[in-house]
C-alpha cells in the first residue's frame, strides 16, 4: 500500500519519518510513504491519478482547505473546521482533520485566555482544539481582517466566541500575560512576537528548533510543533491502516531525525 504527504513546500516534512516508523513497528512491511510537491491547483489531478493501492494522503500547506473540494466524504469535524489535513483513500475520498487531536495532544490540559496568531487552515483547527480543551476566551491576531472570513465562519460553526484583531504587527497587548499563545504562522513570520508572562506557548513550526518565537517566550512552558506533528500523525496512521499509531516508536524516530538534522 502507498501513502504520502503533499504540500508546497514539502521537502522539509518529517511526516515520512513518522509514518515509515509506524509501518515498521506495526509490521506493515509492504507499506510505503513518500513526499510530493503539490499546489492547490494540482491536488485534484494528483488524486485522480491514484489507484486503489493508495491508502491515504497527509495534506499540509497550502492544501488544507482545497482538500474539502476533492473529497467525496467529509468528517463532521473537518466540515466544522473548514479544513482537512487527511484524505483517506481506498475506493473513497474521505477528508478528516487530525490537526485538532494533534494540538490537544501537544498542549495537554490548559485553561484561561488564549491568543492565536494567524488565520489559515491550522488556525481553524486550533479553534476546535481550544474548544475541546474547554477554553472559551480566544483572541485571534491577523494582519488583514478582510482575509479572516474563513476563520470567522469556523468560529461560528464551532460555537467558539473569538475576537479577531488586526494586531499581528504589534501584538504585545494581547500576548503578554496570556495563558496560552499559539502561533500558526509560517516560518519566520512570528519572529517579532515576544510573549512576556505567558503560561504556555506553542509554535506549529518545528524546524529549525527552537524558533525565534519559541526562544523569546521566557518563563513560559514552550511546546514544539513536533509534538503536534507526532500526535496528529498517530491519528492519521490509524485512519489509513485501521491500527492505532505506535506513538513511542514514532516519537523515537522523530527524535532521531531531528537530531540528525541538527
Image (cartoon, rainbow, N blue to C red):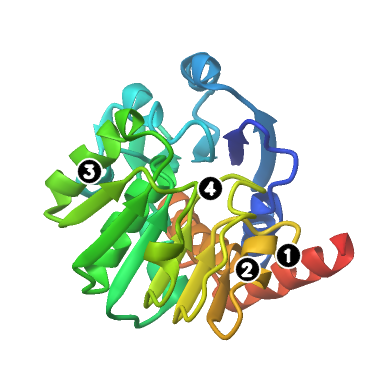
Mark-to-mark CA distance, 4 and 1: 15 Å
Q: Is residue 92 visible?
A: no
Question: Do labels 3 and 1 touch, CB within 8 Å?
Answer: no
Assign the C terminus to one quadrant of the image. bottom right
Mark-to-mark CA distance, 2 and 1: 8 Å
Question: Do labels 2 and 1 touch, CB within 8 Å?
Answer: yes
Residue at the bottom extreme of this rendering = 219
Residue occupied by mark 2 = 214
Mark 2 or mark 3, earlier in chain: 3
Mark-to-mark CA distance, 4 and 2: 12 Å
Residue occupied by mark 3 = 154
Q: Which of the pair 202/237 is nearer the observer?
A: 202
User: Residue, x 55% and y 19% (percent of image)?
Assistant: 46
Residue occupied by mark 4 = 185
Q: Is residue 47 left or right of residue 18?
A: left
Mark-to-mark CA distance, 2 and 3: 27 Å
State the SS at label 4. loop
Assign the N terminus to one quadrant of the image. top right
Label 3 crowding class (10 Å Cα cut-off): few <14, some 14-19, many 20+? many
Label 1 crowding class (10 Å Cα cut-off): few <14, some 14-19, many 20+? some
Q: Which of the pair 6/93 is nearer the observer?
A: 6
Question: Do labels 4 and 1 touch, CB within 8 Å?
Answer: no
Residue 56: percent from the left, percent from the top? 49, 40
Question: Eyeballing the image, is 190 above or below 50?
Answer: below
State the SS at label 2. helix
Mark-to-mark CA distance, 3 and 1: 30 Å
User: Residue, x 54% and y 40% (percent of image)?
Assistant: 60
Mark 4 or mark 1, earlier in chain: 4
State the SS at label 3. helix
Mark 3 or mark 4, earlier in chain: 3
Mark 3 or mark 1, earlier in chain: 3
Amino acid at each position: 500500500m502507498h501513502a504520502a504527504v503533499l504540500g508546497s513546500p514539502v521537502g522539509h516534512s518529517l511526516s515520512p519519518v513518522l509514518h515509515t516508523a509506524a509501518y515498521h513497528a506495526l509490521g506493515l512491511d509492504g507499506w510505503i510513504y513518500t513526499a510530493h510537491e503539490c499546489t492547490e491547483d494540482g491536488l485534484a489531478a494528483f488524486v485522480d491519478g491514484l489507484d486503489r493501492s493508495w491508502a491515504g494522503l497527509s495534506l499540509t500547506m497550502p492544501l488544507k482547505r482545497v482538500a474539502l473540494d476533492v473529497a467525496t466524504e467529509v468528517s463532521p469535524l473537518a466540515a466544522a473546521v473548514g479544513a482537512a489535513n487527511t484524505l483517506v483513500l481506498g475506493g473513497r475520498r474521505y477528508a478528516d482533520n487530525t490537526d485538532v487531536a494533534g494540538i490537544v495532544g501537544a498542549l495537554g490540559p490548559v485553561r484561561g485566555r488564549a491568543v492565536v496568531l494567524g488565520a489559515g487552515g491550522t488556525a481553524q483547527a486550533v479553534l476546535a482544539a481550544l474548544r475541546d480543551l474547554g477554553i472559551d476566551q480566544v483572541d485571534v491576531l491577523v494582519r488583514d481582517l478582510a482575509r479572516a472570513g474563513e476563520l470567522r465562519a469556523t468560529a461560528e460553526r464551532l460555537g467558539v466566541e473569538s475576537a479577531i484583531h488586526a494586531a499581528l504587527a504589534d501584538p504585545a497587548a494581547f500576548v503578554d500575560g496570556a495563558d496560552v499563545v499559539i502561533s500558526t504562522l509560517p516560518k519566520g513570520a512570528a519572529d517579532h512576537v515576544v510573549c512576556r508572562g505567558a503560561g504556555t506557548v506553542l509554535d506549529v513550526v518545528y524546524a529549525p528548533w527552537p524558533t525565534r518565537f519559541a526562544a523569546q517566550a521566557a518563563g513560559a512552558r514552550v511546546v514544539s510543533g513536533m509534538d503536534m506533528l507526532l500526535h496528529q500523525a498517530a491519528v492519521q496512521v490509524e485512519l489509513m491502516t485501521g491500527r492505532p499509531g505506535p506513538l513511542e516508536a514514532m516519537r523515537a524516530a522523530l527524535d532521531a531525525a531531528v537530531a540528525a538534522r541538527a
